[in-house]
Image (tube, rainbow, N blue to C red):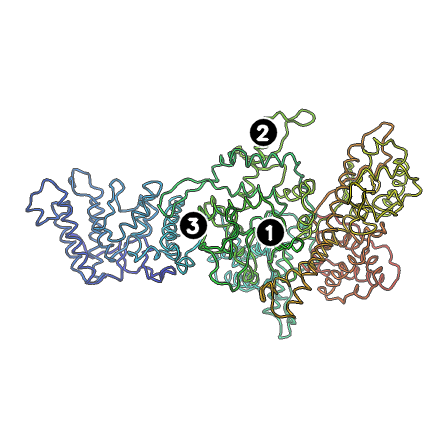
Amino acid sequence: MIDVEHTENWHANPSRVLSKITSNYIFVNDSTRYCVLPTWNSESIRSASVTWREHVASLTAKSYSLGKTALSNPDPTKQGYSEQVVDLINEILETDEGTSALPLLEAFLLEMRRVSVLPRKEKGFKVSSLRFIEFLFILWKHRLIAFPASQVWAFRESDIPLGRAIEISELHFGDMAEVMTSLTLPLKHPGQGRAMLRFILACSKPFEIGDYDYAVLKLFEPFALKLNHQTLVYGITDQVHARQRMVYHGNREAELALPQSYREIFIRQKGEDRSSAEFRWAIGRGSSRVEKWREQLADYVASLPNRVGLRYEISHLNLVLDYVIATQDVPDEPLRYCRRDYTAAVSIGSFQEETRNISERRASGSLRNIARFFDWVISTYGSDEDGIPYREYANPIDIDDLPPQATSKGQTDRDAIPLRFLRMIREIIEGDDYAWPKTIRSDYLEYTDPKTGQRTRVWSPVRAEFILLRLLLPIRALQTRLLDSGEGDPEIWSTEQGWQPNTGSLAPTDKTGQRELGFIRRIWDHHSGRTFNGLFITTNKTQDREELFTENGYEIPWENADVIQLFCRLRDWQVRYNPIVRAISRADLKSDKKLVVSADLAKRLYGLHFLFRDAADRDFPHEPPTEGRLHGFWALLIAELERRLEEAGQTNSDGSKIQLIRRHKASGVPKTPIFDMHSLRVSGLTAFIDAGVPIHILSEFVAGHATILMTLYYHKPGAAEITRVLDSALEEMSTNESQNWAAFLKNQPTELIHEIAAYNSDEGLRAAQSTQSSLWSPMAGGICPNGATLCNVGGPLLNEGKKVYAPVPGGSKNCALCRYFVTGPAFLGGLVAAFNQTGGQIRELFGFLEENQTRRRAIIAEHGTLPTDRKVSAELTTVDEAVQSTQSKLDIFSQTWVSQLRLIQKIEKIIETHANDNGKNTLVLNGQLRDLSISLEESTEFEMWDRICQSSTFYPNVDARLPAIRRARMFDVMFKRNGRPSVFATLTDQQMIVIGNEAANLLRSMIGSPRLEDVLAGRLALDDLGIAPQFEEFIQQRVDGGDVAAIGYEKRVAG
């Protein structure tokens, strides 16, 4: 007899899930045991009895050896069921309550497993575990039972026999048979098909495919992660998702409830994920003591406002939890740790020193962040109503005892990529219809056609197009990753039909709150009175800001056919092969832990339809490519460039091979190229200038979101220090040099002058030779051979026949655009100073332009382009005039900026060409000037204003009044943050320049340039650095007009 009392393999407590897609309930057996469902009742058991008889009849009909009598009265014992099992089945089918059937089901299962391991001779030809399983299928069909979730991915542990084909028929599975067939047929191999069957059986029979929602799949996570069958898992989840997209296409409510993907549920973590702002990794790591610390650390992080990169704080605060977990005598809450009468046996600093292999300065930075947490603890839990801390509490970390924290050098060491290499890289990507990128296996994906259900292997162009766009546009990698496809815009652009209403699934449903975020957008041109297709960059902020972080983005008014074609083909590819169901904000991205943002900021970020969705990323196909995947592609690309250079026989000047890869992985895969992928931006900007990109577009790149400065460098061996300011000695040296150069220029033959001077037109050289040098007008950046008297005809040619010339663009003394202007190496410093001043003017104008454009958009959004209200119409006209006027000024300043840059580049070329010229025509150059070179670099706003102010000391043509005001405001804000009264607001323009220069130089000498930015932004306080009294005394003495004794500080080297 079979023991029917034990139910070790069955239970009656499934999880009940309400689907957000369909609003139907479904039961999930997230267990290692079989489950009797709550839907077991007399009606369903009677229906199952009918199906059981039909099943036996079907088996009998297939048996050709039986006669008509057997067909009319089928006997299950003739089809592989023993009399004992038949009796058990009949008892089960007569039981109206599921819990009462548990012992019977247990006996049935035990017998099935006993039979499954019997040798064929003992169990006979027809007897197999498949007959038992078919009965369980029937019970599942009528929502009576569910199979174990633990068997879904663990195929060897499944009771469903591997060696026998499972017939997916309506008899066993009802109306789910067709759905199950459509889900299993496209899968790559039988193992995936069987896993899909087991997944479906582990839930109650659904009413529709949408009953399997995110919460249902989430219940299968523990079993999948434990067994690491990720290929199997993704095959199932992708197929379910594809079927749901097909079934609910056009059902907006259901589509909005669909997740982007089910893959993220089953991602394998490589090691411990310690990036959570809630410090989830520490849950369950200790007693309630650890949990209390974790909760308060999470509350502190949640309180941090306006953070784009929370990863730094989180990384440092993880140390606190490691310390609490490892140190048993730490109090059970942070406030008690802050008591003055408590002394830890092992301090956090000592623990860090023992457990972290980091430099002293990095350790200091970590402890400073932790100290801010304890400040918050005392302020929140250990202070009175007025916010005054109680005397018994003090911060356990004394930051005054800490060494200066680690700082960056404030500038990149990246090598610029030669233009010929850039051209070759583009050819490698695009050549022969992307032949080389298509050889990279990690850019392929399995695509399921939602109409046919068929799966095909498809190449993803995302990484190739990403690099290609960065070759075409000098924007940052992060900005490229966050570009929008326009799938959610009201209108959409195609090369065939132009602008058309967006009819896609992501099109906005109403006009309220619509935002056009697509990379290609229509821009109104005030000059031509028409619209054109420009570019829209969704973000221009990449760092934490003290002011409120917004992500308004900015426009680039450039109709670039190559960029537009790239956009259209990639967007269309995404819509077809990698569709999404809704927009995602950068706060919701899970693939890149570096993009973790603060909670307040997450609420303000717009959802984006990412153009560069990395479909070939196994885990996050709907998110932009990670830095790791981009770097991997870039390394392979540079390795291919190296290979082609060698194949073409190109070598270094000494005949050696051109090495572009510094290091390879152990597998031989290239790891570290000599060119950083991020240097594409600076290389791209230079290439654009050389290619003659329209002036106003360059201005957008420069002033729309970044500050560009020209820096002079010493490249003489042993003196590789950046010269931030040309001091008086260099100015004197430069003055002498310019006098020598002028005399030298006057006496040279015409053919040589072409080689040693930089100029806009040959007419400048002819004028220099035909006039006496005493009549020349020397300036900081060059000379005017006409004594500054022909500004009215120094512009472009208007009438070639009559030789009529326009005035110099921008007015008198705008020498950089004058056809007579001549300059050379001796004037490099002054020309660089003028270049930086022009950049500051461009930035200032762009701020004014952005304000008016924002104001104009707001008026049009509310009243349209032709408002009927006279007051509103007049306001719109005024704003339009302001925009046009500012754009005109910007055009002139931009022309000046580019002309100055070209002259500087010509001078640099002259210096390089003649540096070792020992002939009689050697340039008369001071040895130190000969060692100068230039670098175009991004800088902060403070650096830009300060550089202009500093250079005005030596170059009177530099007007530093406005830059001094901007810099002074930043100093006063810094004083206010440090609890000091403002100082600079009461100074005269000249005092702002002089005292501001000294203040900036003093701070740099005391704390270094990178940390100066931290102080100005409020990330570091003067008191924290121990310099507040000295700096305050210095400023006050200078304001009072007194002399200041020697400061007594040596410049600290930034570490």
Q: Is residue 794 left or right of residue 279?
A: right
Secondary structure category for the residue under label 1: strand
Location of residue 690 in the rendering, given as x and y in whole percent from the top left corner? 69, 40
Q: Which mark is residue 263?
A: 3
In three-dimensional space, the C-alpha distance between marks 2 and 1, rounded to whole angstroms, equals 40 Å
Location of residue 717 in the rendering, given as x and y in whole percent from the top left corner? 77, 36
Sequence-first tag of 2 and 3:
3
Report if the CB atoms under discs 2 and 3 are less than 8 Å apart: no
Q: Which mark is residue 399?
A: none
Vertical order, 915 against 602 (above or below):
above
Secondary structure category for the residue under label 3: helix
Q: Amino acid at mark 1?
A: Phe
Location of residue 1049 in the rendering, given as x and y in whole percent from the top left corner? 80, 53
Q: Is residue 17 left or right of residue 796?
A: left
Mark 2 — residue? Answer: 644
Residue 541 visible in the shown view: no
